[in-house]
Each structure stands twice: as C-alpha cells, then as structure tokens.
Image (spheres, rainbow, N blue to C red):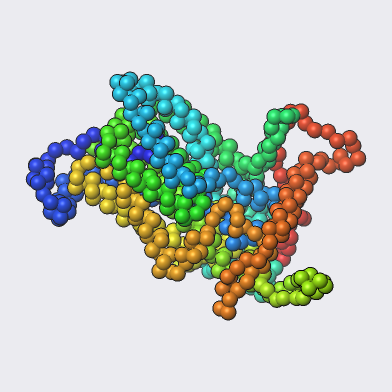
C-alpha cells in the first residue's frame, strides 16, 4: 500500500539547526525528555503544525466513523411501511463494505513492501521523479473522483440539515415539525396529540426565520428548494445483456460529483497543496466507510502486522522516507508553515481509523444487544427412538430484537431541537434518542489515538528523525480497546462480534442458564436457510414490482434494450398527509 506513509510527522525539509542540537546529541533519553519544553519553544512553528495535523486526523476519523454506521445485527430492520419506504431502507443497508480476513495480516505488509520497494527503485532509476509524479497525479486524481464526490455530497447533506431541519424547538420548549406535504409547520396541542398548524410560520426555515415576512412566491420557492434537496431520485440504467442497475441519488449527490470533477481540474491546473490535502481527506473518509476489519481479532492482527512493517521500513531502510518526500501526490497530508512544513501519511489515518470505526459500530451493536428480550416459547419435539412416535413440548427462549432506528444525518435536528443542557442526551425524536447511544469503546479508542499521536510528536522533536506513527498508534488504540473490554467484562462479546452476517438472524431460539444468560443457540441451519430464502423471495418480488408500469397488467411483457432514466417521486397531495389540521 503506497498510501501507508509511515513518516507521519517528518518535515518535508529538515528542521533547521539550532544551538542546542550538539548538546542534545550527547544526552540520555531521560535528559532529552526533560528538555522537551525547551525544544517545544524553540520549534513552536513545527509544534503548531503538528497540532493541526493531529486535529485533522482525529476529525477525519471521527466523521468517517459516524458515516460508517449501519444497522447492527442486534437490531431488526425497520418496520416495513409503504413499498417505496421499504426499498429505500434496504438500499441504505446494502451499501458495499469490504471486510478484511485474518490472512490480510500477512498479505497487507507483503503487498505494501513490494509496492514501496518498487517505487523506491523506480525513483532511483528515473533520477528525476517529475515524470512519475505526473503519472501518479493523473492516476490518484482519477481514483479520487468517487471519494471526493462522496465527501462533498455528505458535506452538502450536512449543511442542508442545518438549513432545513425536520424539527426545531422554541425558547419555551414547544417542538415544531416541518411538514413538506402541507408546506406548513405544526406542534402538538397541550391537551391532546393532535397536530396544530401555525399560520404565522409559512416558510420551511427554523427559529425566528420561520416567521419571515416573505411573499407567497418566495415561501413557495423555499419549499421547492427544500423538496429538491431532500427527496430521493431513482437512476436506472439498463443495456440488454450488459447491465441492469437502479440506485438512489439526491440532488446533493449530483452536486458533489460536479464539485469533485471541478476540484480535480483545478488541482491539475494549480497543483495546490490545499486541494491535494482535500483529496487525501476524501481517500481517508471513503476508506474508513468502505473497509471493515470484520472482527476485533482480525483488526488487531492486521494492525500489528503493519506495526512491524512500519518500524522496519522507517528505521532500517531508506525506502519509506525517500518515497514519502520525493512523491508529490495525494497519499499524505501536508501542512506548511512560515518556515517549516510537516506531513502525515494517509495510512496512519485509515488503518487505525477502520479499527476505531469498528469500535463505534460495536458500541452501536451493544446498545441494541442490551435491549433484546428473551421471550418464552413452547416448542414441539418428536421422538422415534423407542419405535413409537412420541410428541413432547419444551419451554425455551426466543431472542426478540428491538427495531432499528437510523441515527445518521441528525446533526441539524440535534442543533435546532435540543436545549443546551441536553446536547449530550437528546430525546426530542426517536432518531435523536437513538443517535445518543453510549460510545464507550469509540471514545476510548479516540483517546488512545490522541495520546499515541502526542507521543509521536514528542519523539519527533526529541530525536529529530522521521517516526513510524504506527509504532505508537497501534498499541495506543489496540491496548486501550481490549483493556476497556476487560474492565467492563465484555471480552466474550468483543470476540464473538463479527460483521460477516452470521449474527444477523431472526427468531433465534437459545438456551439460558439460571441467571438468564444465553449459553447456546439451538436454531438449526434449516431454519436459517428458510429465512434467507424468504428474504430473497421478498427482494425479488420488490424488484419485479418496480419494473411493472401502471396499466400494463394485461399487455405483452417487454424488456428495455437500452434505458437511462432519472425518476423523481410524485409530490404528495396535502390530503395524503395523516396530520390533521386543528
């Protein structure tokens, strides 16, 4: 992996010599640490650069981890409503995720070493890396289009949520809901649950802007903009015998793709360091979302494999430092100051980041796992061992999982509807309440990452040499998480947790001990096969129903030879809304 740059906090140019350098060379490690405050003051420009890098890396991991949330196997899919709603929810759940295998603990370091050594000798053979830089810039900028489109689109979704929230709260605690179908805002009456529409609030904006004195056409324009930004479109592409795909997009997704293309063109024109960093952010963001360690055991093995690789390549070979400093491509984040610059490899964000994201998803899993119920059920057994058919019944427990509530894209509602005293535990809507699940392992991993990055900075300033960040990041994150599991007594749950789909079962029958703890699962494979077959049947039925058109039931069946369409949902009439005007 060429992007696993393990010279994370090395300056692109050497730190300027100072009067204390000759003295520090003869000091012991303890003496060097004691003189760290003096070193920090003398290198305060570099120190500020490293603080910016640490903040940027942690922000990327925090945002990417939350974007990587999905329905945990300890929760049931959302209840099926109308056809369009169920399909939309399924599309959100079926996003592609690349899971790692235990063999990747060996494969990743080997592949990374082969690529790194190959790049090193290619640079030496070319003598001038400009040609290689141009080729790699074209390659990485092309590969970054999807990542940048995703980053820009999610940023636009984030801003849209703040401008057009679905709920907001007044100073006196009254909760208003924004109703797109009736183009109005309502709250519940004090003495009933019926909605009461406020005639003064004509616009879809929250707070004091909801009562702006605008013309009817201006308010109508705002409502149309809100609908355009929030509704989902269906894009269909069908070429007979080649491809037949349909996927959901929003206007912000298309806008994000356009911005990504514009950013790539501008990057090739200006070779801006800022745009190179934006590409690096996009790669890191998409990597954290799309990659999963699958299990804590696999994640630990992969990170420790790269841990030893990083140490060897930085301390015992010239490969890593040479490639990182010679190649000017978006495989690193570069921060420039008045006199110095510093960089962080994307591998030092993505690799610990996918493990931190796994911790957040495990917190999410445990949140629903603790809500499950063990319901007694009567099971009928038949025994033919005695030569006669004997029927008997036995009471066992069936696991009933709670229904899943999507906690994503709630920042705008959280900002506008939650009071300052409840920012950490919002409860105005079910989605906000679900988004406030305990994040013990996630915060522990983030603290471990922060301390490890601080240690990397200290070692850089003390030894004046490029440091392999994974030397500190891997133990800092891994040990913090496993120690937390040990203290909380949840090592069994951590070890059993997997994202390969084995835990995503329904109507599971289990045996429990005297304390009510699950000790064994008694479902046989035949039951799971029936469930899987039922799910496939439902999915195929939905796909077929989407292909049918109205009034086509009695006509000859046809298929498209070539089809490309963008379909928007029909606007709901005001009479379709269940809200009652009082």
Q: Is residue 444 above or below residue 346?
A: below
Q: Position of residue 63 (x, y in %)?
A: 46, 50
The residue under the point 26% across, 38% down is 316
Most foreground residue, 484 or 146:
484
**Residue placed farthest to the right in the image?**
554
Q: Residue at x 73, y 29 (%)?
A: 241
Q: Nearer the viewer, residue 348 or 146?
A: 348
Tell me if residue 177 can be seen. no
- Quadrant in which the N terminus is drawn: top left
On the image, which quarter does residue 268 sit in? top left
The answer, for residue 532, to whether it is visible in the render is yes
Q: Position of residue 234 (x, y in %)?
A: 68, 40
- Count of numbered badges drawn on the protein: 0
Name the side, left or right, on which 487 lies relative to 454. right
Question: 306 or 327, which lies in front?
Answer: 306
Q: Residue furthest front?
A: 387
Query: Residue 175: image x %, image y %?
Result: 58, 65
Q: Nearer the viewer, residue 152 or 439?
A: 439
**Residue located farthest toward the bottom when viewing the structure as drawn:** 514
* Residue 153 sits above or below residue 273 on the image: below
**Quadrant hosting residue 580:** bottom right
Q: Quadrant of the C terminus?
A: bottom right
Q: Give left or right: position of 29 versus 263.
A: left
Residue at x 42%, y 36% (from the top left corner): 111
Percent x, y for residue 230?
62, 47
**Which residue occupies 64% across, 69% down?**
510
Q: Say above or below: 84 vs 3.
A: below
């Amino acid at each position: 992996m060429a992007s696993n740059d393990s010279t994370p906090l090395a300056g692109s140019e050497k730190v300027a010599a100072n009067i204390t350098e000759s003295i520090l060379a003869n000091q012991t490690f303890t003496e060097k640490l004691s003189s760290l405050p003096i070193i920090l003051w003398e290198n305060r420009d570099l120190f500020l650069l490293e603080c910016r890098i640490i903040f940027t890396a942690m922000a990327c991991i925090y945002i990417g981890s939350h974007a990587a949330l999905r329905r945990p196997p300890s929760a049931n899919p959302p209840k099926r409503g109308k056809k369009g709603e169920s399909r939309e929810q399924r599309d959100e759940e079926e996003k592609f995720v690349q899971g790692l295998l235990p063999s990747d603990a060996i494969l990743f370091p080997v592949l990374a070493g082969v690529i790194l050594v190959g790049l090193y000798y290619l640079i030496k053979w070319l003598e001038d890396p400009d040609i290689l830089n141009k080729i790699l810039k074209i390659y990485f900028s092309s590969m970054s289009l999807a990542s940048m489109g995703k980053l820009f689109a999610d940023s636009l979704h984030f801003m849209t949520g703040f401008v057009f929230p679905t709920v907001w709260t007044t100073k006196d605690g009254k909760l208003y809901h924004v109703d797109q179908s009736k183009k109005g805002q309502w709250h519940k009456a004090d003495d009933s649950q019926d909605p009461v529409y406020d005639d003064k609030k004509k616009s879809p904006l929250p707070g004091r802007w909801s009562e702006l004195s605008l013309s009817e056409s201006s308010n109508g324009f705002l409502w149309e903009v809100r609908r355009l930004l929030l509704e989902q479109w269906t894009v269909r592409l069908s070429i007979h015998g080649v491809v037949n795909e349909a996927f959901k997009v929003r206007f912000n997704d298309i806008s994000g793709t356009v911005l990504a293309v514009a950013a790539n063109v501008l990057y090739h024109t200006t070779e801006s360091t800022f745009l190179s960093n934006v590409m690096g952010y996009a790669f890191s963001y998409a990597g954290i979302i799309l990659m999963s360690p699958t299990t804590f055991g696999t994640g630990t093995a992969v990170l420790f494999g790269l841990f030893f690789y990083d140490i060897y390549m930085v301390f015992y070979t010239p490969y890593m430092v040479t490639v990182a400093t010679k190649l000017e491509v978006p495989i690193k984040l570069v921060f420039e100051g008045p006199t110095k610059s510093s960089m962080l490899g994307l591998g030092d964000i993505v690799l610990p980041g996918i493990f931190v994201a796994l911790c957040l998803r495990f917190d999410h899993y445990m949140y629903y796992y603790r809500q499950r119920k063990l319901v007694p059920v009567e099971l009928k057994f038949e025994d033919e061992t005695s030569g006669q058919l004997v029927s008997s019944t036995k009471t066992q427990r069936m696991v009933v999982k709670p229904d899943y509530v999507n906690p994503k894209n709630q920042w705008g509602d959280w900002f506008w509807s939650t009071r300052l005293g409840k920012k950490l535990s919002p409860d105005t809507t079910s989605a906000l309440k679900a988004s406030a699940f305990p994040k013990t392992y996630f915060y522990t991993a983030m603290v471990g990452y922060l301390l490890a990055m601080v240690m990397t900075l200290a070692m850089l300033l003390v030894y004046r040499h490029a440091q392999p960040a994974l030397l500190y990041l891997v133990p800092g994150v891994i040990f913090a998480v496993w120690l937390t599991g040990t203290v909380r007594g949840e090592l069994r749950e951590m070890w059993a947790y997997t994202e390969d789909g084995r835990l995503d079962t329904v109507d599971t029958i289990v045996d429990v001990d005297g304390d009510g703890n699950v000790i064994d699962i008694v479902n046989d494979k035949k039951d799971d096969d029936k469930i899987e077959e039922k799910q496939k049947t439902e999915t195929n039925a939905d796909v077929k129903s989407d292909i049918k058109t109205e009034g086509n039931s009695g006509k000859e069946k046809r298929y498209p030879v070539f089809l490309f369409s963008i379909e928007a949902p029909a606007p709901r009439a005001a009479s379709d809304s269940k809200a009652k005007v009082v």
